[in-house]
Image: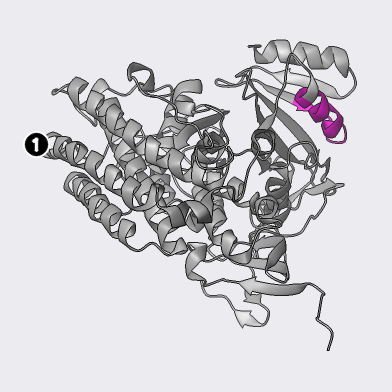
Amino acid sequence: MKTREEIFEILKSQFPDAVLGIDSSLPTEPIISIDPLKIKEISIFLRDSEELKFDSLMLLSGVDDANGIKTKDEKGFDIINGGTLSVYYHLDSVYLKQKVTLKVSAPRENPEVESVAMVWRSADWHEREAFDLLGIKFLNHPNLIRILMPYDWEGHPLRKDYQNPEFYQGMKISY
Amino acid sequence: MALKTERMVLNMGPQHPATHGVLRLELEVEGELVAKVTPHIGYLHRCFEKHCEAMMYNQVVPYTDRMDYVSSMYNNWGYAIAVEKLLGIQVSEKVEYIRVIMGELQRIASHALALGSFGLDIGAWTPFLYLFRDRERILTLFEMTCGARLLYNYIWVGGLSHDIHPDFLRMTREFVRDFRATVDEVNNLLSYNKIFIERTANIGILPIDTAINFGCTGPTLRGSGLAYDLRKDDTYSIYNRFDFNVCVGQGLQGTVGDAWDRYYVRILEMLESLRIIEQALDQIPSEGDVQSAIPKRIKPPKGTVYARVENPRGELGYFIISDGNTNPFRVKVRPPSFVHLEIMSDLCKGHLVSDMMAILGSIDIVLGEVDR
């Protein structure tokens, strides 16, 4: 069983450009930051390496970091410009009983992250959910369509500056 | 006239009784054989995760009830563990024991519903009634403790909403004593019934590597033969104090990882849960305040936490990001049913349309949790 710091060292020596750093200041779990366009390569390494063997993706979650410039529009709603959207990957090794958390951040205006759906099949629906609710684009995903919201919905509800629409297909939405 | 040989698209649901909720399955069939299944979900979507961002930490608990509404206790518990980890709270011994008893009772109740409705889907009426009769007794125990029968809001961050009733321990003991007989009865009526075996053995075989790659957990993974149980492998609460076995599918009636194996793992798990409850009843301290550790105001430090528990359906995880405020910045749930529904397409390929019901019943999904 390896600690997250040891896993970071292994990754850093293998992929010096793509592994950006480790945040150990958090009280519960250190998080390794990765380049969003290299995540697939690193995932394949994490899954296939004999000493790491991360064979299961427990959770993939999209997060709106809301770290851009906040302004208000004429109706008083928040608008966020700039900053990042992030994706967190919680990996688990069923046989070696070790865990690791990865994080990638992509710019809010064009959030493109390499898909890992071909590495862990469970990522397929999780990525569709992150696309649906946060608008993160997963490159080379087999079927990137909405999953929880209606297929013709506009906007991404989990973004921090999301505004509830007044109408859906001409029907008034009551809240 | 020549036979038509092209594939036919068939819609099952959203209101089909065997889909266990509001789920639409789009089937492509070649004659009676299923070629492709595309699940369409989201009919019960209410954006639980967005709600959480507008709530204070303790106000989220009743919302978690409504995800997997047949195992609400465990949903509460998972959330409580995640926030307690973030805050660094230790709960008292008595609270831990009550949580374990409630959690395992909930597991039995949830499996009783899963197995009963599984039989029902295939056409076995009677076991459903026996199991529901006994599930009713568990619900009575819950009602006695917290006043609710389905959505409990019982396990709070740092404690419990109520202490147990003076009669609770005695009645739980009586239930444990009686329930073993029900399991035998269900075994006679359903598990070893020839028709049931014919319908479920060698159906929907899930190989172990596929199961892991798809992120399957709980009885679905154990049915494939891997002894992986978070209560043992990533232990939480006080589960390391109890002696119990992790049950796995052995392919007794067919191949390892078929629908019958997944069914039978649940039967065995109910018996193991009874053992845990018995031990917890023996060890539970009589004195103790169940609300002493409840924080007046929850304001965790900046940070993230991922806590996971072994829900009756599999790994239930909560990923919480705190920005140091009284509201969570982001709550993301890992619902086991959401992950399990994804394997439907692979499992059903090449089976008869009627076998799909056996497969869907054996992976035991709850749509409230899939859609959140």
Q: Which residue is drawn at 81% across and 80% down?
A: B4
The residue sitting at the left extreme is B166
Residue B98 among magenta residues: no
For the N terminus of chain B, give its image quadrant: bottom right
**Which one is nearer the viewer's eye here, B168 or B191?**
B191
As shown in the figure, which amino acid type bears the numbered disc 1?
Pro
Q: Is residue A88 something one can see in this rendering?
A: yes
Q: Is mark 1 on a helix, strand or loop?
A: loop
Horizontal side, residue B332 vs residue B235: left or right: right
**Which one is nearer the viewer's eye here, B290 or B248?**
B248
Q: Is residue B247 above or below residue A74?
A: above
Give the residue number, with chain letter if any, for mark 1: B166
Q: Name the main secondary structure of what is drawn in magenta.
A: helix
Horizontal side, residue B282 vs residue B95: left or right: left
Colour scheme shown: one colour
The residue segment tinted magenta is A33-47
Identify the subunit bearing mark 1. Answer: B
State the image coordinates of residue B273 (x, y, percent, origin top left).
Answer: 33, 33
Q: In this view, does A11 lie above or below A141?
A: above
Residue B246 location, quadrant: top left
State the image coordinates of residue B372 (x, y, percent, origin top left).
Answer: 53, 54
Horizontal side, residue A19 vs residue B58: left or right: right
